[in-house]
Amino acid sequence: MGFIQEFKDFAMRGNVVDLAVGIIIGGAFGKVVTALVDGVLMPPIGLLIGGVNFDQLAFELRAATAESAAVSLNYGAFLQTIVDFVIIAFSIFVVIKALNSLKRKSEEAPKAPPVPSKEEVLLGEIRDLLKERG
């Protein structure tokens, strides 16, 4: 088997394709959550705590001089990233919890008792006849 054919077989295997789709959807979902946090959630929170724009929250370690730029710890962007992470993690938790719940329901479904084989039926009849004879 040639190298290219082996690569095609590998790339078209179900797990690889599923993983690629999951990564693409995850990236898109991350962008949606970031837009939600940046544009919808953080502005009202900033307004509630005094009109603060979280992107601009920073501790200035050294002021800018003519020779060098300011040095600061930009913790506002970090806070927004933490909120993004919490929302994404919670969303994934809810989806996995729902999938596990569906999986458990299908596993808990009562199974029909196995149909006895011909030998088992015959042995049962012999047992019953022997009981009757006493």
Image (cartoon, rainbow, N blue to C red):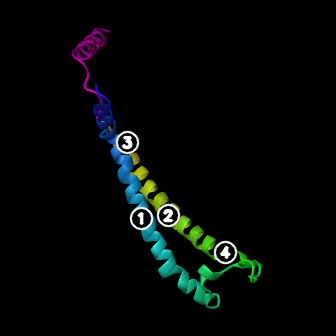
Type of residue at label 3? Glu
* Coordinates of residue 120 in the picture (x, y in percent): 27, 16
Observer-nearest residue: 122 or 64? Answer: 64
The Cα–Cα distance between marks 1 and 2, rounded to whole angstroms, is 8 Å
The answer to if 114 sits in the magenta stretch is yes
Query: Residue drawn at (69%, 79%), measured in percent from left and top?
Result: 58
- What residue did someone put label 3 on? 107
Q: CA distance from mark 3 to mark 1?
A: 30 Å
* Nearer the camera: disc 1 or disc 4: 4
Disc number lying in front (3 or 4):
4
- Identify the element where label 1 is drawn: helix
Residue 88's disc is: 2
Mark-to-mark CA distance, 2 and 3: 28 Å
**The quadrant where residue 15 appears:** top left
Residue where numbered disc 4 is placed: 74
Query: Residue at image x 51%, y 67%?
Result: 87
Q: CA distance from mark 1 to mark 4?
A: 25 Å
Give the structural element (helix, strand or loop) at label 3: helix
Q: Are marks 3 and 1 in contact (CB under 8 Å)?
A: no
Q: Badge 3 local density, few (<14 within 10 Å), some, or many (20+)?
A: few
The disc, 3 or 4, on the residue closer to the chain's N-terminal end is 4
Reply above or below: 88 against 56: above
Residue 124 in the magenta stretch? The answer is: yes
Three-letter code, disc 1: Phe
Is the residue marked by circle 2 packed among few (<14), some (14-19), or many (20+) residues within 10 Å?
some
Q: Is residue 106 something that shows in the picture?
A: no
Tell which tag, 1 or 2, sits nearer the viewer: 1
Residues packed near mark 1 inside 10 Å, few (<14), some (14 to 19) or many (20 plus):
some
Compare marks 3 and 1 and give the one earlier in the sequence.
1
- Which of the marked residues, 1 or 2, is nearer the chain's N terminus? 1
Region rendered in magenta: 112-134
The residue identified by callout 1 is 29
